[in-house]
Every structure is written in C-alpha cells, then in structure tokens.
Amino acid sequence: MLTDQAGKGVHQDTPGPGQSAQNPLRTGGNLLQLVSPEGERISHPEFDVWVKDIGDEQLCSLYEDMTVIRRIDAEATALQRQGELALWPPLLGQEASQIGSSRSLRDDDFVFPSYRESGVAYVRGAHLTEIARVWRGNASYGWDPQRINLATPQIIIGSQSLHATGYAMGVQLDGANTAVLAYFGDGATSEGDVNEAMVFAASYQAPVVFFCQNNHWAISEPVRIQSHVQLADRPTGFGIPSIRVDGNDVLAVMAATRVALDRARKGGGPTFIEAVTYRMGPHTTADDPTRYRDPIELEDWAAKDPILRLRKLLEAKGLLTDDVEARVKAKADAVAAELRSSCIDMQDPQPLDVFNHVYSTPNSWIERQKDHYSRYLNSFNQPVEEGAL
Amino acid sequence: MSKLTFARAINAGLRKSLENDPKVVLMGEDIGALGGVFRVTDGLQKDFGKHRVIDSPLAESGIIGTAVGLAYRGYRPVCEIQFDGFIYPAFDQIVSQVAKMHYRTQGRVKMPITIRVPFGGGIGSPEHHSESPEAYFTHTSGLRVVAVSNPQDAYTMIQQAIASDDPVLYFEPKRRYHDKGDVDETIDLSTALPLDKAAVVSSGSDVTLVAYGPLVKTAKDAAMAAADEGISVEVIDLRSLAPVDYPVVEASVRKTGRLVITHEAGQSGGLGAEIAASITERCFNYLESAPVRITGFDVPYPYSKLEMHHLPDLDRILDGVDRALGRRNSLSGLEG
C-alpha cells in the first residue's frame, strides 16, 4: 500500500512467494452463474449473499436499465446509418455485464471506461446528448468526468487500466474509502499497459477492479489469438485474484463486482473480473462481422441473450406484468426519442474552437496560429477589390 | 545565494515543491533509497516518506500511465525517466494521454505532470543513455518542453514546471549535473522569468547563437573565443523548447542579421530546422545570410569513443559562426 504513514514499506502487503498462485475467489474454473440461460435461479453458497438484497423491484429495475441501453444502442446505430452520427460502437449482447457492474458502484467510486461502455455512462448519469456528442464528432469528450466520476471513454486499447490504477493509488494516499473500476476487453489483455497496470496494482495493493468484458472478439480477432489460457487465469500470475463470471447473467455480474469492490474498499487490493459475454453486433458501425464470424456462433450466443434470460427469470417469478412491460417500453421509447432529438439538435462547434483547451494557460504557438487562421477566415468577409484577382 | 551543483539544485527545487504542496508526489525507478542513478532525488524519500517519493516498478508506461490517474485524482506527479533512451515505452502514454487529456476533456481534466528526463551525451555511456529525444515531444501539442542549462534555472524551473497546470517535459543535461553555480533559493517564482521565456545569456551584435540544455555552456565558451577574434556573438538560451520564445530570437536576429542554432539531437526534422524556418518566415528581410545548424548527425547516438565527433563542440560552433558571417570555414566553396 502507498499509505505508509507509519513508515512501513510500500510492498508490505504484497503476497509472498507461493501465495500468488492461490486465488480465493476462483470458482474452480467454472463460470460463476446465478441465473441459467433458461432463467432459473441457481443458488451459490458463497455469492448468493452478495445479491440477497436484490428483490423483485430491483430485478425489474435491472431489466429496465438493460432494455433501455439496448434501445439506446439500436437508436444510435440507426442514427449512424442515417448520417447523424459519424460512428457508433454497439454494445448489443453486453447489457448484463455493463448494467450488473455499473449498478454495483457507489457514486464516489471512480470508473475508467473504454469506448463501448455507453450503458455504464447511462447508469452513471451521463446525459444522452453527452453520450452522443463524441460519436457525432462534436467533441472528444461527452460528460464532465468529475461530475459523475466517470472518465472520458478511452480509445487507446487498455490505456485506462493504468489510469485507474494511478487513481486508486491516489485514493490510497488520501486514505479514502473509494474503489476504482477499469473496463476493458479481451483484446486489451494483450496490451502492455494492462499488464503493467496489474504489476502496479499488485505491487501497491491498489483499490482497483479490472473488469474485463470478454466479448470474444477484438474487431476480427477471436479471443484465442490473445490468449491460450482463460483470461481469468492471467491475473493470478501477478498475485491478483480473479473471478470468471457469466457476463450475460446480470445477477452474477453484480455479485462478482460487489465482492471485488468490497475487497478494494477494505484494503484487500485489486481484483480481476472476466465477464464472459458476447459482442452480438459489429465492432463499430464501420465493421462487417460477416467477413470473419460464423453465423452459427452468433445463434448460439443469441440463445444466451442477457435480456432474454432476465425476462425468463421475471416470468418465472410472475414479475413480468403488462404494467412492467408497458413502463419499460415507455421509458425506452422516451430515452430513444430524447437521444435522437438531442443528437439532431446539437450545436456544431465553431471553427476557432479547434484551438481551445490545448493548454490550460496561453501558449504563444497556439495563439499565433489562431490569430492567423482567424484572419484567414475573416478574409472571406472582405469585399473583393476591383482587379484584385 | 548558495553554491550548488546542478543535481543538487534540482534536488532543492523538488524538496521545496514537496514542502509547499502536499499533492506533489515523485515517482520513478530507483528514486527512493538510492536517490536516483544520478542522486537527483537524494534524501527525499527519507524526508518525505515512501508514499510521496515512490519507487515504481520498472515499467515506464506504467509510471506515466499511473501518473495520469493520480493527476485525475488531483495530484501533481513528478516522474523521473531514468535515461533519455528509456522514455520510449512511455511514449504512448505521454503523447496519447498526458498531452491530449486537457484538450480531450475541454479543460475539465488537467494533467499537471512533470516528466524529468536526463538527456544528452558526453558521459561515455553505452547505447540508450545519451539521446536527445526532445523534438518528438516539441512536435506533440499539449506538452510544454523545457531544457535547463544552469543550476539557478534548474532550481527555479523545476518548481515552475511542477506548479504548471499543463504537463511539462523537463530535460536535464546529465553531463552538467556536477557543474556548480550560484543559486538563489529565496527566488520568488511569481516574479522569476516565466517557464516559456528565453534568455539572452551573453550579448552581442554580429551573430545570434541559439542553444539550450548542455550546449549553452559550450555556446557561451564559443562566444568568448569568438570575441578574441573580434566577433561579437549573442547567445540565447532557449530554456523553453515548446513553445519557443520567438520574440526574443527575432529581436536578436533583427539586430545581428545572422543565426546559428546548435543542438546535440540529429539535424533532420530537429528543433534547429523549426527555428530556422520560423525565423526565416518572421524576419527574412533582416537576415544577411542563411541560418546555420550545428547539430548532432543523423545517426543513432554513436558508441562513446566516437561521441566527441557527434556532439557539437566549441570549434564546430565557431565554424558555424564563420559560415554565418561569410568568413572562411570548413564548407567554403561548397555553399550555394
């Protein structure tokens, strides 16, 4: 730990040799599952307690959030096809991973997402216009990171895992009871930064959760190109315990995330979660998965659809009433309509905005170029003198 | 006023920043008990604790990437990259994250990160220990890049860099670490010469000689030698490499009409090229001759037995001064 006010060494809490191979959280190589694809509740002696507060109302609320973000995703994809967004990275299929994890966070926790975590942004309280703005090309950021404790989505693969670890080191220095969570995907586990993040997090026992959504595809590359072992087996070599969870089971994702966040808050150090899910859509709207993906694989995963699964559970519990269905549909419709209108009504940036905020204080190079470009733009407003051409 | 070595002056500046701002933390390889391979952080971990002077794992991208997270949390990390040639594993974090975060978030997230880099040659080291990578970073918008040339600036500018809300790459000329100089430790940072200003370090009227970092001393020596021949050389210590303080260079060139730029880094695409182009654009009509660059060659930094050929020295600089003045020089007859 970094907080060594007592003068103790920074590496004091690092597991010693022999300990690192142990993984108290692993479920014997099996997926942690609390709801089967058929919608049956599976009891688990260790993890049930972490979701025992999730009653009927909260199950319906999780269903609502998952349905709404799927609708956001569909609407955004449509907006891209209509030329209103430049690009969109779909999250279709990953609703349980994103909602289950983000609904486990406290407001004071800090999250470092990748570009695909639009569902997380929705749960953290980002406005729809803020979610759309980056993908319309109107800004490079959506929301104020400090307002909703959610960093600007990271496009460089895995880079944010180090930012999350550093932020968690700061939390330690502050002596705060805050956890930090980094989202990344299966492809990112090959990046040096993710591995360096695990080194730093383990070394300082930083309160960080590495939430890896293994959606099986890094653009066109299947996960087997990234790793010959389960991704959840990688962090154990760094002395970081891991949980391999069914990423299409929202209850299991919640349980796993809560365990990991709790460990972080109690000074237990980092945890790695592999949420096994599936990217049902393309990498982005610019991608064409028919070039590299077997349609049978997609069918297999469609049968494990996270929303379908939760619906079956709700049905079995008699919770999927007309009222609930109507309420969720109305909410999804309203959110989609708001996303569309806020996207289309968005104000375009002004030409000279290109120079803003490169630095926090005036910079002579930028000022000069801004001045010259301003003069250039103004030259179009000058009357052309006779014979000037 | 105290007499301090260059390394000690940086140490004193770091100490002052650690004392004045609890959000300042130092990170790097071997900076704790060892005090850094050049002893620049000597004694700081002992006095400020392992939580503020942090020995980091041997991963440069990890050092800078975690510094980004610390900055997100409100800290002011000061990262030491052990040697110039070891900075490249961190290049992505510096260029894609540190430099762009403020722009990306339209000012909502600041990156007050200082990255200290011992740079330049002349110490007889093996490969990767003598490089001058500054142009990679001056070409990256969002970064401020400075190179210090004397103990007083080292002391003052490290504190200004740490206080800056923008990220600063702070290049330290490692072959000057043991040079001593007067340092006023009571200097008021708010009235000191700002971080982005150049300084005329010796006045002259015939030729403007622009240098930074380790070559400022060499340039001043060259100016003295030229004076023996009746040539008056004005030496400018750039101090800031991004942005370059062009008004100071321009004012000098308008006076002298001749410009020589020297740096250890290779010539092509280097800072000298940028300065020659900018000064030509800004005061072409005042130039009496073409700008001259006296630089390292476009070769990988050579093995130490050859480094004296690669590094600009007093005589090569004087040869460049002669060229700018149209006097007989090593390239006489080739020009044009």
Image (cartoon, grey):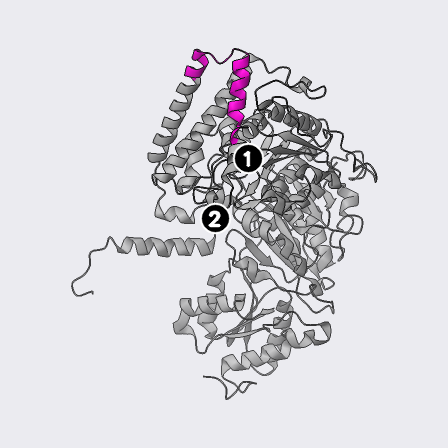
> Which of the pair A201/B200 is nearer the observer?
A201
Q: Residue furthest bottom?
A: B333
Quarter of the image containing the C terminus of chain A?
bottom left
Distance from label 2 to label 1 (Cα)?
38 Å
Badge 2 is on which residue? A358
Q: At which x and y percent is residue A209?
A: 65, 33
Mark 1 Cα shell of 10 Å, populated few (<14), some (14-19), many (≥20) = many
Q: Earlier in the sequence, mark 2 or mark 1?
A: 1
Q: Which residue is mark 1?
A: A278
Q: In this rendering, does residue B22 appear at all?
A: no
Give x and y (percent) for residue A270.
70, 34
Crowding at mark 2 (Cα within 10 Å: few <14, some 14-19, many 20+): many
Q: Residue furthest left?
A: A386
- In percent of width and height, residue B319 lies at 58, 81
User: In percent of the image, x 54 and y 49: which residue is there?
Assistant: B96
Q: Verify whether residue A242 appears in magenta.
A: no
Q: Is residue A101 left or right of residue A340?
A: right
Answer yes or no: is residue B47 visible: yes
* Residue closest to the eye, A322 or A99: A322
> Mark 2 belongs to which amino acid?
Val
Left or right side of A345 for A226: right
**What segment carries the magenta color?**
A302-327
Q: Quadrant of the N terminus of chain A?
A: top right
Give x and y (percent) for residue A226: 63, 46
Q: Amino acid at mark 1?
A: Tyr
Is residue A311 part of the magenta span, yes or no?
yes
Q: Chain of mark 1?
A: A
